[in-house]
Image (cartoon, rainbow, N blue to C red):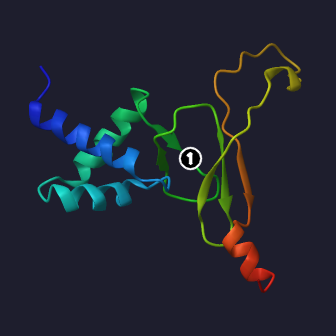
Amino acid sequence: MINTRNTVQRELILTTVRSMDCHPTAEEVYDSVAAVDGHISKGTVYRNLALLSSMGRIRKVCMPGTSPDRYDFNLEPHYHAICRKCGKIVDVGCTLQEKCIDFHEPFMVEDVDLVFSGLCGDCCCENNGH
């Protein structure tokens, strides 16, 4: 039997992730959720983020060379770009075609995580003096 309180908290966490347009960390989700429900614990947020991502309701995004993990409400196939200066993460709207990958052994692709690294528009303009 599912605990009603956890279901309410889970939906609050899901709604919060969906409202954040910044690929938030678990800590950022917790801060936003705690502003609404001051009784929620960090453990509850972390457990529910893991559960929601395993259920396919949100996407866990592991950024190479950075920590911690981020969460994304956009479940459509897409990739990410991270600014090496400010850490901003943005969606990249392209798809990798399986036929362009040349595996030397039989291999069935189930998922692809591709991350572009560089400078976002704001940081790029700062470096060029604009």
Classify residue 118 as left or right of residue 59: right
- Identify the residue at the far front of this view: 130
The part of the image, by quadrant, that contains residue 33 is: bottom left
Query: Measured along the vertical axis of the image, is residue 103 above or below residue 44?
Result: above
Residue at 14 percent of width and 59 percent of height: 38
- Closer to us: 23 or 111: 23
Residue 62 in the image, given as x and y percentages of width and height: 56, 47
- Closer to us: 52 or 14: 14
Three-letter residue code for mark 1: Cys
Q: Quadrant of the N terminus?
A: top left
Residue at 38 percent of width and 53 percent of height: 26
Classify residue 126 as left or right of residue 74: right
Residue 106 in the image, given as x and y percentages of width and height: 80, 13
- Identify the residue at the far top of this view: 106
How many circles with numbers are drawn on the protein?
A: 1
Query: Measured along the vertical axis of the image, is residue 62 above or below residue 85?
Result: above
Callout 1: helix, strand or loop?
loop
Residue 52 in the image, given as x and y percentages of width and height: 36, 34
- Closer to us: 129 or 81: 129
Residue at 87 percent of width and 26 percent of height: 100
Residue 18 in the image, given as x and y percentages of width and height: 39, 44
Q: Quadrant of the C terminus?
A: bottom right
Q: What residue is pinned by disc 1?
A: 62
Residue at 61 percent of width and 71 percent of height: 86
Q: Crowding at label 1, few (<14), some or many (≥20) Cα neighbours within 10 Å?
A: some
